[in-house]
Amino acid sequence: MKESRLPKRLDLRYRTSSENDHDRAKAIFSGAILVYRSLPAMHELVQFLREITIREIASSDPCSAESFLGSKEFRHRASAARRFVRENDEVSRLYKKVLLEAGVDISALFFDHFKLRFQPSNKASQSRYMRDLPAHRDTWGSNVHSQINWWAPVWPVTADRTIGIFPALWNSPVQNSSAEWSYRELIKDLKGEKSKDYPMLPQCLTPPAQNEAVPVVINPGDIMAFSGAHLHCSIPNRTGLVRISTETRTVSLHDLIYSRSAKNVDCGSSISHFDWFHHIEIGDSLADYYSNKSGSF
């Protein structure tokens, strides 16, 4: 039987005003979790995301959707909401406004996507894109250690229906499949060129005990920023309610230029996926910028 470590407290720091990129990076890449509280733009974004979700799910209570929709219909409607958010200009405008209110210099900012995430309670309602995510570091996949994750609830969350972080493993290696995992193979699988169910992200080979994950509960209107190198997961949702949240991942050119990043404790990947990130205003690929600078910033 695997012995679990005692849960360690999160270095959770609340912000009620903006801060510059240097101070944010210094805190986050030392392992701190920053929560920007009740940002006006975040309240606007939450309201807009709620309107989209209510329309697509066709209910004023989408968190209860599994109780009145069949699993197939739930997946269909939730997927439609996810697609709409990913492609919507107003979502993009509001996300930029949120980041500006947090003090981010968006002229130097690259991001992956603006996402709406559903975590169903019923396993039959889950899909590759809507499920409990196991423990992982985002940097196992991207191998970009200056990556910052932004996460926020759209409807209220609880300790048994939220995101969990493993603070005791911030600087401790965890056996994982990052050295073997291939984004190219994943894309082939998603396009149907492969018959196997290729993992969506590198996996823990020796997963930590679930009770080591510390649940993070913040309010709609708050947004959390943390290093992509933090080991984190979905707290398994067995509440009967869907968790609905939003997220994005960013890389600041300032952090790359000044070598501000989290320590790589266990990522075995030899490929850094700068191509996953595009400039938040003009759309240029971070990979192209990196290539034009001859492999250095």
Image (spheres, rainbow, N blue to C red):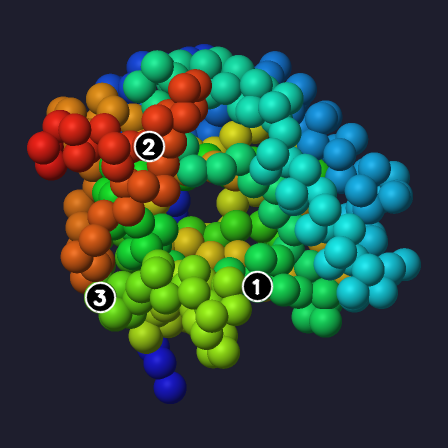
Q: Position of residue 273 (x, y in %)?
A: 28, 46
Give the Cα distance between marks 3 and 2. Answer: 24 Å
**Looking at the image, is mark 1 or mark 2 earlier in the sequence?**
1
Q: Residue at horizontal 65%, vertical 51%?
A: 118
Q: Which numbered marker is on residue 234?
A: none
**In this orientation, does residue 74 appear?**
yes
**Looking at the image, is mark 1 or mark 3 earlier in the sequence?**
1
Q: Quadrant of the N terminus?
A: bottom left
Task: Write down the quadrant of residue 109 in the picture.
Answer: top left
Task: Write down the quadrant of residue 49 in the picture.
Answer: top right
Q: Is residue 26 left or right of residue 221?
A: left
Q: Position of residue 294 (x, y in %)?
A: 9, 33
The residue pinned by badge 3 equals 179
The residue pinned by badge 2 equals 285
Q: Which numbered marker is on residue 128?
A: 1
**Judging from the image, what secondary structure is the residue with disc 3 in?**
loop
